[in-house]
Image (cartoon, helix red, strand yellow):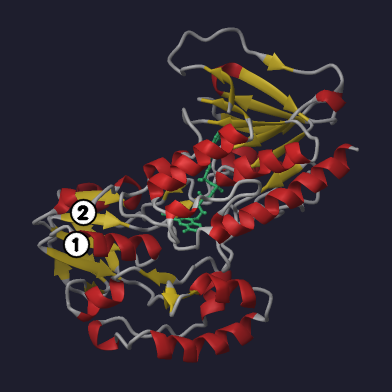
């Protein structure tokens, strides 16, 4: 990895730095974010003969993965999670552990000698005054001018904690799942996990395995649950095969498959969902990959409760009117994209804050401004990030020609 600059935010600020190049054709493409999406795109751009510079706000690449909880393993297979130009070593196993993922991302930047600027946060993207490129305003008063920009700041950018009534006065412990590391910290305690996406489901299991006294899981909408693998066949393979089929057809096919592979948990408070699996994915809800939840629910080790509607000083109020008093609450309530300040003024976001153009298709009125990683594909985000990287790189090369 070629580290171009490392400037602590607390360091005395030099005069704003305008990295401009006389000849617009010599400007690099700036990639904002040094996660898998940004790194893969930088590599793919280089492979197309385009100079790319990754700007990362943390002090190292793969920052999101460094923060994830200890138990985390990929739920997509090693082979279908590798980025272009570097396979993941066999010794990582089929389901890659968090630390191995971090190691892989470090290696990826190093092996491909990607130009990476760490410790620099981009706060705003604007067109250059002459309209020939893009100006990035970044921490330390930096102004970076690029021929194109790829925004790869992550779908899971800013933890989202619902504005539950009474939340502020709750005296118990309330943390977002983004701050959760391990169930060890909760041993012997009564814990409520809110939200049954992949993160909430796995945290509930992790708490049980690490000796929490009681684990409850608050569910607003019953999720689709799939086995990560059946007789060696990964759920991801099926997802890749069906991803281009009509949504309603996949919904119909998924129903009997779910009945065959996942037991009915209605008696435990987790009925089968009434909306289709692929329809839900299109709304942004990825099915829960079972990493122990089914077993834990059946054995009563994870108790399902109704949705949280509010907090009181010493308790939590649920949608069915009950009031419970856990020692700690972990809110696995998702993330928001956090793109408003960065690019909102360019009119490129929809009413849910998602970019209106994606991958090789920039928003209509902002040619040269690309986004990657802002969808939730059924076939696995890492796989799609890898595919998008190569498509974006080709589109940029065509644009710069
Ligand atoms: C718990 C969890 C498990 C997941 N497991 C899987 C899985 O098994 N398989 C799969 O395919 N997908 C998985 N995903 C989804 C997805 O693959 C990952 O979130 C992946 O890290 C997305 O890569 P990314 O590069 O788009 O974003 P990120 O990895 O989030 O990287 C974004 C980077 O941008 C930086 N950044 C943000 N804002 C700025 C800024 N303004 N200026 C400079 N830098 C900035 C951040 O510090 C970060 O390093 C998982 C997601 C989560 C949350």
Secondary structure of the residue carrying numbered label 1: helix
**Residue 255: image location, x then y, percent:** 49, 88
Between 35 and 78, which is closer to the camera in this rendering? 78
**Residue 115: image location, x then y, percent:** 64, 28
Count of numbered badges drawn on the protein:
2
Whether tag 2 and tag 1 are in contact, CB under 8 A, the answer is yes
Tell me if mark 1 has few (under 14), some (14-19) or many (20+) residues whose alpha carbon lies within 10 angstroms of its own. Answer: some
Residue 66, compared with residue 79, is above or below; it is: above
Q: Residue at x 67, y 80 (%)?
A: 245
Q: Which mark is residue 198?
A: none
Q: Is residue 281 left or right of residue 181?
A: right
Residue under numbered circle 2: 183
**Residue 55: image location, x then y, percent:** 60, 30
Residue 14, compared with residue 191, is above or below; it is: above
Within 8 Å: ligand 1 and the Cβ of disc 1?
no
Q: Residue furthest front?
A: 91
Between 291 and 286, which is closer to the camera in this rendering? 291
Residue 149 in sight in this render: yes
Q: Residue at x 76, y 45 (%)?
A: 393
Residue under numbered circle 1: 209
Q: Residue at x 31, y 81 (%)?
A: 270
């Amino acid at each position: 990895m070629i580290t171009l600059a490392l400037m602590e935010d607390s360091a005395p600020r030099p005069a704003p730095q305008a990295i401009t190049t006389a000849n617009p054709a010599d400007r690099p493409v700036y990639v904002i974010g040094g996660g898998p999406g940004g790194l893969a795109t930088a590599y793919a751009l280089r492979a197309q003969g385009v100079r790319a510079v990754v700007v990362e706000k943390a002090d190292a690449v793969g920052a999101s993965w460094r923060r994830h909880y200890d138990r985390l393993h990929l739920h997509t297979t090693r082979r279908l999670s590798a980025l272009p130009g570097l396979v993941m070593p066999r010794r990582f196993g089929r389901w890659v552990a968090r630390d191995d993922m971090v190691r892989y991302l470090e290696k990826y930047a190093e092996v491909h000698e990607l130009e990476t600027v760490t410790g620099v946060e981009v706060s705003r993207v604007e067109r250059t005054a002459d309209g020939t490129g893009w100006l990035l305003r970044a921490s330390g008063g930096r102004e970076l001018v690029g021929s194109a920009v790829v925004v790869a700041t992550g779908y899971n950018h800013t933890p989202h904690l619902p504005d539950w009534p009474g939340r502020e006065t709750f005296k118990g412990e309330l943390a977002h799942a983004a701050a959760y590391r391990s169930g060890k910290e909760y041993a012997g305690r009564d814990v409520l996990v809110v939200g049954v996406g992949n993160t909430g489901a796995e945290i509930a299991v992790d708490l049980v395995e690490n000796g929490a006294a009681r684990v409850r899981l608050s569910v607003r909408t019953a999720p689709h649950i799939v086995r990560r693998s059946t007789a060696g066949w990964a759920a991801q393979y099926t997802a890749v095969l069906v991803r281009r089929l009509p949504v309603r057809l996949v919904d119909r096919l998924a129903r009997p498959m779910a009945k065959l592979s996942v037991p009915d948990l209605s008696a435990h408070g987790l009925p089968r969902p009434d909306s289709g699996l692929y329809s839900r994915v299109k709304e942004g809800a990825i099915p829960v990959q079972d990493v122990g939840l089914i077993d834990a629910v059946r054995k009563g080790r994870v108790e399902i409760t109704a949705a949280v509607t509010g907090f009181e000083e010493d308790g939590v109020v649920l949608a069915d009117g009950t009031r419970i008093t856990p020692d700690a609450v972990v809110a696995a309530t998702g993330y928001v994209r956090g793109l408003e300040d960065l690019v909102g003024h360019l009119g490129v976001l929809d009413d849910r804050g998602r970019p209106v153009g994606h991958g090789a298709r920039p928003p209509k009125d902002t040619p040269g401004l690309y986004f990657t990683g802002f969808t939730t594909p059924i076939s696995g985000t890492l796989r799609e990030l890898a595919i998008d990287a190569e498509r974006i790189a080709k589109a940029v090369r065509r644009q710069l020609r």
